[in-house]
Image (spheres, helix red, strand yellow):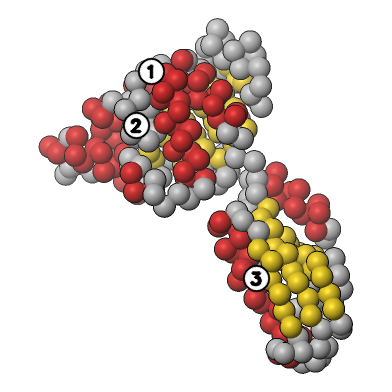
Amino acid sequence: MDVYEEVVRLRHDGRHGALATIINVKGSIPSYASAKMLVRDDGSTVGTIGGGCVEAEVLQVARKVMDDEKPQTLAFNLNREPGYDTGLVCGGKLEIYVEPVVPDPVLYIFGAGHVGLNVYKIALLAGFVVVVIDDRVAFANRERFPDATDVIAEDWNTAMNRLTPSPASYILIATRGHSEDAHVLRWAIDTATSYIGMIGSRHKVATVYHDLIASGVAAEKFAHVHAPVGLDIGASTPEEIAVSVVGELIALRRRCAAALPHMRHIAKLAAVAEPSLEKVA
């Protein structure tokens, strides 16, 4: 299997990986300069950089490179650490560059109104690939969203059946009504995405949550649902709300330790907003 082809496939599938390349060699080593090994997010590999303890250490570092999305350079002295060369005692030195393989972050925006339009604009600037979905052709069209990867103007069920969000994707629910939001949310919580954000007041968010719980949806499915969506920066206008939403997406993507504790989760908010309904949940 070709390493480069697998990198392309991995990114296309919305998965992460780490590519290790031998970049500098002095003396004899159990491989060769430019040898590559791709480590997938499930721990499986393609290619080799020589095996043994060197490869085992690279496998450990690869996970951190994937999580941090930051490259690392590792140096090995096989003469000083003969165990690294699997008993061959080659005595050489080598450096290995481990770089992240990162899929493009895809943002699915359900709702092409004022908030959706402004989130689309800012998300594009922040490097997101954007797909816009609405059941109104007058709103979901190429004139309003010229740079979106896709603009889908179909009824919600037809549109959702076409989509297969990956773990590297994000979903924003900002439709024109309470029932539409709940309908999309019920579909979204069963997708592979790791982030779902839903716009709305605290009362609306709590109502949607408890209605879905009452209809039989398991509470644990809401673990990655953020609502009201966006960082709490006092946003009021559609433009300000868009800034808060994309700010939250960036914080999650970059694993910002300072921002994570301040993000709002639907289950916690619902319990506070509707204490009389806690037993239902």
Image quarter in which the C terminus is found: top left
SS at mark 1 in the image: loop
Amino acid type at mark 2: Ile
Q: Which residue is mark 3?
A: 59
**Foreground disc of the pair 3, 1:** 1
Amino acid type assigned to the residue bearing label 1 in the image: Thr
Residue position for label 2: 233
Numbered-mark total: 3
Circle 2 or circle 3, nearest the eye = 2
Q: Residue at x 45, y 20 (%)?
A: 239
**Quarter of the image that includes the N terminus:** bottom right
Q: Are marks 2 and 1 in contact (CB under 8 Å)?
A: no
Which percent across, then down, holds residue 196?
A: 44, 38
Report the Cα–Cα distance between label 2 and label 3: 40 Å
Residue hosting label 1: 237
Judge by depth and name the residue closer to the eye, 261 or 27: 27
Residue 34: x and y in percent read: 85, 65
